[in-house]
């Protein structure tokens, strides 16, 4: 499967612990996005990268959250000192930058579900 | 900032019934509009999109949507649904070409009864 992959698929942690999620985008995709989805809601934008540069961060991304894409390939999303309100599905998506093959489509992974006890 | 409203939270239909899911957006400028679908246990995937041109767009699996600018709407339709259309459907908007920062609606869960 050459789609977007995320790891782990499910993480259960205790309040106050740190967690890290990894996303491997489709290999030729320059842009990488993180979204958060809570029960009964649509995905909400958190942040995105173009290559290794983090170009935008949502106000939803508190200082306990940090995302990196060090070599412009895979990305990590770390949550420090988790809170019960952080329980959600964390979705990663990738896309190409506008050009001849541009379709505007985001390709999503299956998500990493976080449960904070 | 843009927002998206999906008024139908859960729709239950019998096979072969016609489907229309509502989507309204709030944004004053040029928008790109999308419908994404999430089948049970699978990732979100694109169903169809509108950038410009013909306001009636066709997507995969027999779905279509019509952009009505005056009503800020982008409703999804299918003339005859199948059991395999059971899924969650999300309308989304981005402000202008080359910007994939999607704003999603809350989704509509569609259940098709065989």
Image (tube, rainbow, N blue to C red):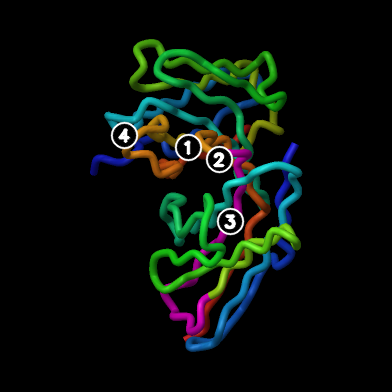
Front disc: 2 or 4: 4
Q: Which numbered tag is attached to residue B90?
A: 3
Which residue occupies 75% across, 62% down? B71
Give me the C-alpha separation between circle 2 and circle 4: 20 Å
Tell me which label, 4 or 1, sits earlier in the chain. Answer: 4
Q: Residue B107: x and y, percent?
A: 63, 57
Picture quarter containing residue A50?
top left
Question: Which chain does tag 4 point to?
Answer: A
Q: Which range of residues does the magenta coloring cover?
A: B78-96
Q: Residue at x 47, y 15 (%)?
A: A68
Residue B112 placed where, x, y %? 52, 79
Of callouts 2 and 4, the N-terminal one:
4
Please name the residue that numbered disc 2 is placed on: A89
Say whether residue B79 is magenta. yes
Residue B56, position as x, y percentages in the image: 53, 67
Q: Are marks 1 and 2 in contact (CB under 8 Å)?
A: yes
Tell me how far mark 1 sits from mark 2, CA to CA.
Answer: 6 Å
For residue B63, above or below residue A17: below
Helix, strand or loop at mark 4: loop
- Residue identified by numbered label 1: A112
Q: Is residue A15 left or right of residue B55?
A: right
**Mark 1 Cα-neighbour bin, 10 Å: few <14, some 14–19, many ≥20:** many
Question: Looking at the image, is A36 positioned above or below residue B75?
Answer: above
Instruction: Tell me how far mark 3 sits from mark 2, CA to CA.
Output: 16 Å
Q: Please give the residue where the numbered disc 4 appears in the rendered image.
A: A26
Share a chain, discs 3 and 1?
no
Which SS class for mark 1? strand
Q: Nearer the viewer, mark 4 or mark 1?
A: 4
Cα gap from disc 3 to disc 1, whole angstroms: 19 Å
């Amino acid at each position: 499967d050459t789609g977007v992959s995320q790891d782990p698929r499910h993480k259960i942690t205790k309040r106050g612990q740190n967690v890290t999620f990894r996303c491997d985008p489709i290999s030729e995709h320059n842009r990488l996005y993180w979204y958060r989805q809570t029960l009964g809601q649509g995905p909400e934008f958190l942040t995105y990268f173009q290559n290794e540069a983090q170009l935008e961060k949502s106000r939803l991304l508190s200082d306990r959250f940090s995302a990196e894409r060090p070599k412009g390939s895979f990305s990590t999303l770390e949550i420090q000192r988790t809170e019960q309100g952080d329980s959600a599905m964390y979705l990663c998506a990738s896309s190409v930058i506008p050009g001849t093959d541009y379709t505007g489509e985001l390709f999503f992974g299956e998500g990493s579900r976080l449960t904070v006890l | 900032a843009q927002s998206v409203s999906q008024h139908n939270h859960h729709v239950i239909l019998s096979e072969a019934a016609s489907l229309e899911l509502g989507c309204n957006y709030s944004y004053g400028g040029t928008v790109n509009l999308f419908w994404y679908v999430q089948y049970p246990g699978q990732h979100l995937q694109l169903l169809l999109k509108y950038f410009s041109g013909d306001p009636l767009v066709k997507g995969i699996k027999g779905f279509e949507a019509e952009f009505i600018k005056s009503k800020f709407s982008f409703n999804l339709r299918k003339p005859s649904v199948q059991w395999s259309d059971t899924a969650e459907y999300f309308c989304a908007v981005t402000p202008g070409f080359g910007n994939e920062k999607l704003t999603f609606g809350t989704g509509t869960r569609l259940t098709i009864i065989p």
